[in-house]
Image (cartoon, rainbow, N blue to C red):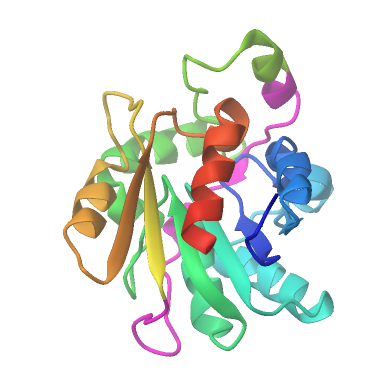
Amino acid sequence: MNTTPAKTFLVCHGAWSAGWAWKKMHPLMQAAGHRLVTPCYTGLGERAHLAHPAITLDTHIEDVLNVIKYEDLRDIVLIGHSYGGMVATGVADRARDKVRQLIYVDAFVPQDGQSLLDLNEAARARMEELAKAGDGWRVPPNPTPPDTSPADLEWLNARRVDMPIKCFETQLKLQGGPLTLPRSYIYATRITPADTFGPFARMTKGDPAWSYYEIDASHSPNVTAPEALMALLQKIAA
């Protein structure tokens, strides 16, 4: 029997993806008595038809803030996955009275004034080249991890869409100073050679202001290891 009080989990999803990628987590959250809210950013998922060159990180922060406002969410456990760490940091900054804790899942952790490409300088030239080679303002999806099942690959590839590069170039502006709410980092240990999230794992593991966890999964445990991710989220939120 579940003894954890019901929580509201709100997801800031990764790049090229959208709320749909958290499909496997909904029944697990429901069974545990929690609410999982998985909105899609402008230009992605079922809002892909709204894509345009002027979309930035701030657009996506605003998307999630409006979900909080219109759904009247409070005491939120905010999750930022991958690029969603950029979004979640901005959301936590601007909705300080609504967000109870922040969980980064293999995600970027920006400081004030940093963009995703500032945090991932190694990818900058490649991203810019890919955007130029396409329509000039969007980047096609990164490859999925090798342990993704064929069925999941088919599901993902049919739904992932190109990402406005401005989202990666926008520098996050914190409006209320450094974040002071409880923060946790989940590092997915089945890494690629680039190990993009290793620096954030090392930074948070050594910082007493953070709780640090690892998961034996590749970069999107919401797809490849939903039960393990659920157990960890329950543990952290409790």
In front: 34, or 219? 34
In front: 163, or 2? 2
Q: Left or right: 184 with respect to 208?
A: right
User: Does residue 19 show up magenta in the picture?
Assistant: no
Identity of the residue drawn at 43% across and 57% down: 169
Count every numbered label the image shows and give the total: 0
Identity of the residue drawn at 82% across and 74% down: 71
78, above or below 22, in the image:
below
Q: Left or right: 47 with respect to 238?
A: right
In front: 61, or 54? 61
Q: Where in the figure is residue 75, as x and y percent of width and height?
A: 63, 78
Q: Where in the figure is residue 180, as x and y percent of width and height?
A: 37, 82
Q: Where in the figure is residue 109, as x and y percent of width and height?
A: 36, 60
Q: Determine if residue 208 is in view.
A: yes
225, above or below 30, in the image:
above
Q: Where in the figure is residue 3, as x and y percent of width and height?
A: 65, 59
Q: State the predominant SS element of the stretch in magenta.
A: loop
In the displayed orientation, state which residue is furthest to the left.
206
Identity of the residue drawn at 71% across and 65% down: 6
Magenta region: 155-181
183, above or below 49, in the image:
below
User: Does residue 160 show up magenta in the picture?
Assistant: yes
> In the figure, residue 98 lies in which quadrant?
bottom right
226, above or below 177, in the image:
above
